Amino acid sequence: MTVTDKAEHSERTSVTLPVSNEPIKIAVVPESATLKPELPMRIFIVTTYPDGTPAKCKFEVTGRGTGDEGREFTAKGETDAVGIGEVIVKLKAAELPKGERRIGRFGGFGAPAPLVRRRPAGIFPEFVSPDEPSLPIMVTVTALDEKGNRSQIQRTLPLSASDESVLLRVDKSIAKVGDNLRLDIFTSSPVPRHSSPVFVDAIVNRQTVLTKTVDLQNGRGSLSLPLTPE
C-alpha cells in the first residue's frame, strides 16, 4: 500500500498474510516408521492454524486396511494448548497377497536380515529391514476447533507384515546429562514366549558404550538408563 500527501511525499508499506484452503493444518506422526501389528502403537496428531499458531482441537482418527476388520479402527482425542495430541491403536497382523513371502526378524533362513537406517518419522530414527513387507493403511483424521473450524486429511501409513515385531519407546523426546531415560520394550510373535531376553545397546559416535540385557515377560519389559557425561 502506498500513501502520497499533498507535497507528493510517498510512504509505502506491505503486509504478508498467509493464504490457505484449510482453516486447520493437520499432521499425522506415527511413533514408528512402520506400524507394528499386535502392539500398542501411538499416533500423534498435530494441529495448527495457517499462520503456524497451535490449534486446540477435538479430533477423530479412522483407519482402514485392504481387507479384514482387524485392521479397521476408530479413535478420538484432543490436541492440547500447543496443538499436540495422541491416540493408541492396536492392529491385527496383515495378510500378504498370495505369492508374496512373509519373513521374520531373521529373514526366514536363520541369518539376520540386513538393517539400514531410515529417515526418522517424527522424532526418533528407526533401523528397519529393507525387505520388511508391509501393507497400506488409509488413515483419515478430522479435526474441529472451539470456533467450529473443521479440517480433514487422509494419509497412507504402512503396516508391517512381518511375523515378529519389536517396538522401543522412550519417555523423553529430548534428554540431557543427569536424566534417567526410561525405555519400554514391546514385542509380538506368532509363537508365545512367556520369558525372553533382549539386548539394548547405547551407541555414541558410532561406538557401543553400553550393553544391557532386559528379560521380557509376556513380550513386555523396561529399562532405566542413567545418562552420564561418558
Image (spheres, rainbow, N blue to C red):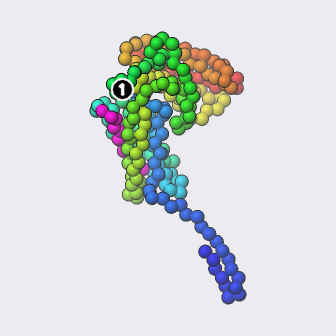
Q: Quadrant location of residue 1? A: bottom right
x then y, percent, for residue 74: 33, 39
Which structural element holds mark 1?
loop
Q: Residue at x 34, y 27 (%)?
A: 97
Between 131 and 183, the residue placed more toward the observer is: 131
Quarter containing the C terminus: top right
- x and y, in percent, of residue 223 in the image: 53, 21
Residue positioned 47% across, 23% down in the render: 166
Residue at 38% x, 41% y is 139
Residue stretch rendered in magenta on the structure: 57-67
Left-right relation of 183 to 67: right
Q: Is residue 109 above or below residue 69?
A: above
Q: How many marks?
A: 1
**Residue 224 magenta-highlighted:** no
Say what amino acid the circle numbered 1 marks: Leu
Q: Is residue 38 left or right of residue 84?
A: left
Give the residue number, with chain letter if any, for mark 1.
96
Is residue 64 magenta-colored? yes
- Most foreground residue, 144 or 93: 93
| 142 relative to 159, above or below | below
Mark 1 crowdedness (10 Å alpha carbons): few <14, some 14-19, many ≥20: some
Image quadrant where residue 155 sits: top left
Residue 64 appearing in the image: yes
Magenta stretch: dominant SS? strand
